[in-house]
C-alpha cells in the first residue's frame, strides 16, 4: 500500500520520573531529511535517532521533537534553587558600582530575581546510553502513529490514481477505435482533392493507394499505444507493491509522457489529438499527486 509523505505521530512515556514526549512530523521532500530537536544532555543520541528514523521512513522532510516535561515536586530535582555564590557576587558588584558612581536606588528582591542565573531549575542528569532503550521505544511508537496516518492518506491517493488511470484507459480506447478510420478518411479526402484538380481527367488509382499506404505507415501509432498500455499496467502494479515507490513513479511518468507525445506528433486526426490532450491533462494531475508519495 502506498504512503503519503505527510503525517504526524506522537507518543510518550516516563524517563527518570519525568514525562518523555516524542513528536514526529513529516512533510514532502524528494529525499529523506531529518531534523532532530532534543534536550542538550541527550544530544549524543541525535545520530542514533536519525538512523532509527531512516530504518522506518525512506522519503520526506521529518521534524523529530524530543522533550522532557517537568512535573514540579515529583522528586525534588526540578524545584527552583538559588545560586547563592552568584547572587552574592552580583550584590557585591552592584553595591560597589552604586557607591563608586554615587547612584540612587535600592538593590531590591526584584533586582535579584532578574539576575541571569540567580534563580534556576537544576537540569536533569540522565545518561544518554541508559536512556536510549526507552527513547527508542517511544520513538518507534511515534513512528508507528506517523506511518498509520501516512497509509490512511495513501489509500485516498491510491483511489485517485486508479480513477485517473481508468480515465486515461478510456481515452486510449477512443484513440484505438479511430486508427482504422484515419487511413480511410485520408484516402477519401485525397481522392476528393484529386477530383477537384483533375475534373474529368484520368488518374493513377494505384498511386493513390500507395500514397495512402505511405501515410498510414508514417502515422502508425500501434507500437506507442502498446507501450503506453504496458507502462500503465506496470504503474498499477507499482501502486500495489509494498516498497517505497515515489522515485520510481517519476520514471514511469517520463515514459508515459514520451509515448503520448509521440502519438500526438504522429497523428493529425482531430479526434485523436483531443484524446491526447485529455491524457496529458490526467498525466499532469497524476504527476502532481505523485509528489506526495513516499
Image: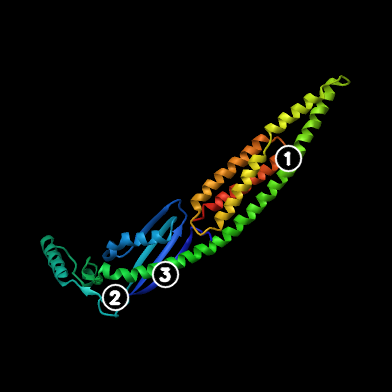
Q: Earlier in the sequence, mark 1 or mark 3?
A: 3
Residue 24: image quadrant is: bottom left
Q: Residue at x 50, y 54 (%)?
A: 245
The relative height of residue 69 versus residue 180 in the rendered view (above or below) is below
Q: Is residue 280 visible?
A: no
The relative height of residue 117 versus residue 209 in the rendered view (above or below) is below
- In the rendered structure, the answer to whether residue 238 lies left or right of residue 226 reads left
The relative height of residue 251 versus residue 82 in the rendered view (above or below) is above
Residue 193: image quadrant is: top right
Q: Residue at x 56, y 43 (%)?
A: 255
Q: Tell me the mark number nearer the camera, choosing from 3 and 2.
A: 3
Q: In the rendered picture of this protein, how many numbered marks are placed on residues? A: 3
Instruction: Name the spot of residue 138 as percent of width and height, x first.
Output: 38, 70
Residue 186: image quadrant is: top right
- Mark 1 packing: few (<14 Cα in 10 Å), some, or many (20+)? some
In terms of secondary structure, where does tag 1 sit?
Answer: helix
Residue picked out by circle 1: 179
- Tag 1 near tag 3, CB within 8 Å: no
- Mark 2 packing: few (<14 Cα in 10 Å), some, or many (20+)? few
Instruction: Name the spot of residue 111 as percent of width and height, x first.
Output: 22, 69
Instruction: Name the spot of residue 21 as percent of width and height, x first.
Output: 37, 70
- In the rendered structure, the answer to whether residue 107 lies left or right of residue 259 reads left
Instruction: Name the spot of residue 151 as percent of width and height, x first.
Output: 52, 63
Q: Residue at x 59, y 44 (%)?
A: 256
- In the rendered structure, the answer to whether residue 39 lies left or right of residue 105 reads right
In terms of secondary structure, where does tag 3 sit?
Answer: helix
Alpha carbon separation for disc pair 2 and 1: 74 Å
Q: Tell me the mark number nearer the camera, choosing from 2 and 1.
A: 1
Q: Earlier in the sequence, mark 3 or mark 2?
A: 2
Residue picked out by circle 3: 141
Q: Tell me the mark number nearer the camera, choosing from 1 and 3.
A: 1
Residue picked out by circle 2: 16
Amino acid at each position: 500500500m502506498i504512503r503519503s509523505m505527510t503525517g504526524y505521530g506522537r507518543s510518550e512515556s516516563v524517563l527518570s520520573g519525568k514525562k518523555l514526549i516524542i513528536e514526529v512530523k513529516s512533510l514532502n521532500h524528494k529525499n529523506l531529511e531529518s531534523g532532530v530537536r532534543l534536550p542538550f544532555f541527550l544530544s549524543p543520541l541525535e545520530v542514533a535517532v536519525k538512523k532509527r528514523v531512516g530504518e522506518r521512513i525512506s522519503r520526506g522532510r521529518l521534524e523529530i521533537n524530543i522533550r522532557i516535561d517537568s512535573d514540579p515536586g515529583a522528586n525534588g530535582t526540578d524545584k527552583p534553587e538559588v545560586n547563592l555564590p552568584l547572587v552574592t557576587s552580583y550584590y557585591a558588584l552592584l553595591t560597589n558600582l552604586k557607591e563608586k558612581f554615587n547612584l540612587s536606588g535600592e538593590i531590591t528582591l526584584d533586582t535579584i530575581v532578574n539576575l541571569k542565573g540567580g534563580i534556576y531549575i537544576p537540569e536533569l542528569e540522565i545518561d544518554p546510553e541508559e536512556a536510549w532503550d526507552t527513547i527508542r521505544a517511544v520513538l518507534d511508537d511515534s513512528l508507528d502513529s506517523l506511518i498509520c496516518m501516512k497509509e490512511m492518506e495513501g489509500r485516498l491517493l491510491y483511489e485517485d490514481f486508479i480513477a485517473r488511470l481508468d480515465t486515461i484507459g478510456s481515452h486510449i480506447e477512443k484513440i484505438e477505435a479511430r486508427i482504422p478510420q484515419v487511413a480511410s478518411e485520408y484516402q477519401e479526402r485525397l481522392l476528393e482533392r484529386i477530383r477537384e484538380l483533375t475534373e474529368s481527367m484520368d488518374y493513377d488509382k494505384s498511386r493513390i493507394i500507395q500514397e495512402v499506404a505511405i501515410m498510414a505507415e508514417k502515422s502508425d501509432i500501434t507500437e506507442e499505444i502498446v507501450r503506453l498500455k504496458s507502462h500503465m499496467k506496470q504503474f498499477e502494479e507499482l501502486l500495489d507493491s509494498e516498497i517505497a515507490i515515489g522515485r520510481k513513479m517519476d520514471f514511469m511518468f517520463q515514459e508515459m509522457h514520451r509515448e503520448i507525445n509521440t502519438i500526438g506528433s504522429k497523428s493529425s486526426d482531430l479526434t485523436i489529438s483531443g484524446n491526447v490532450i485529455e491524457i496529458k491533462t490526467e498525466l499532469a494531475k497524476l504527476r502532481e499527486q505523485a509528489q506526495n508519495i513516499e
